[in-house]
Amino acid sequence: MTDDRGPGSEKTPIFRLLAAIAVPPMNLMAKLRLSGVENVPRTGAFVLAPNHYSEIDPLVVGVAMWKIGRMPRYMAKASLFKIPVVGRLLHASGQIPVERAGSRGSDPLAAARQIADQGLAVVIYPEGTLTRDPDLWPMRGKSGAVRTALEQGIPVIPVAHWGTQLLMPRYGKKISVFPRKTIDVRFGPAVDLSAFAGRKLDSATLTEATDVVMDAITAIFEELRGQTAPAERWDPAKHNQKDTGRFEQ
């Protein structure tokens, strides 16, 4: 299934090139079953907030977005932009370089807000990195997704997927090509953040709003897995685990 969405299609030549590189191998390795695509805005800016438990998740989400006609902009490690060819493709497609925590560099959320101001889709992983939850449930979120959405007045679209761990397990570096996998990707309706409109975006507000987004992602994930998530969301700080926040600061 593909969707060019009319004369204003976001499928520019650079994204068509990226799709030619990424989509055929993904189709070979996995069948993506998409649902809830009617919840993705056909035009205009929004923040896409996915769950995250495998290094290959961004590719899966990117191919899903391609299939429904909205082109994603990600926050990617700045080091990737220094790789020949790869770096040029990332720059040309409008991806956002993120420096290591504590290093000097541009503000990734400022770049995300600029992209949103252009009416495009910005993918921000609220967890910031691979979930530390032993059973792959979404863990405690960070505030980048809701801050961008609330400051820009744009919706947050939650999305969850299940099956990417069969393609590449958490912390794994090798892809399991055969047999072909099935990956379910479900987009939820925009998260209702109206209760936070007009409020000062302090730590308490952002934490509360982030919890609402994480609840929405988790609810979709429960539907895909046919299971109930733990009553308490995993918090790396309570388990003495390093939480680097690779995708947002």
Image (cartoon, rainbow, N blue to C red):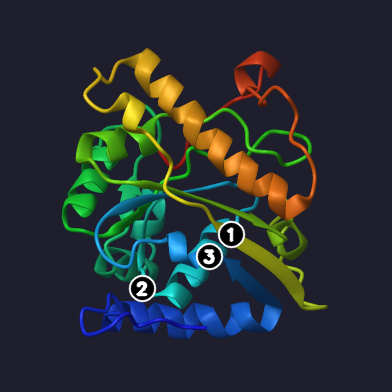
Q: Looking at the picture, which amino acid does disc 2 mark? A: Val
Residue 61 vertical placement versus 199 (above, below): below
Dot 3 or dot 2: first in sequence order is 3
Residue topped by disc 3? 59
* Amino acid type of the residue tagged 1 in the rendering: Arg
The structure residue drawn at horizontal position 69% and vertical position 78%, both measured from the top left corner, is 29
Give the distance between the C-alpha atoms of the residues marked 1 and 3, in whole angstroms: 15 Å
Relative side of 50 to 193, left or right: right
Residue 171 percent coordinates (x, y): 69, 48
Pointer 2 residue = 85
Q: Nearer the viewer, mark 1 or mark 2?
A: 1
Q: Quadrant of residue 136?
A: top right
Mark 1 nearby-residue class (10 Å; few <14, some 14–19, many ≥20): many
Whether 79 is drawn above or below 152: the answer is below
Q: Position of residue 34 (x, y in %)?
A: 59, 69
The answer to which of marks 1 and 3 sits earlier in the sequence is 3
Name the secondary structure under disc 1.
strand
Question: What separation in Å lies between label 1 and label 2 (alpha carbons)?
Answer: 32 Å
Asked if residue 201 is positioned above or below residue 150 in the image, the reply reads above
Badge 1 vs badge 3, beta-carbon distance below 8 Å: no
- Which residue is label 1 attached to? 186
State yes or no: discs 1 and 2 in contact (Cβ < 8 Å).
Answer: no
Q: Position of residue 75 (x, y in %)?
A: 38, 50
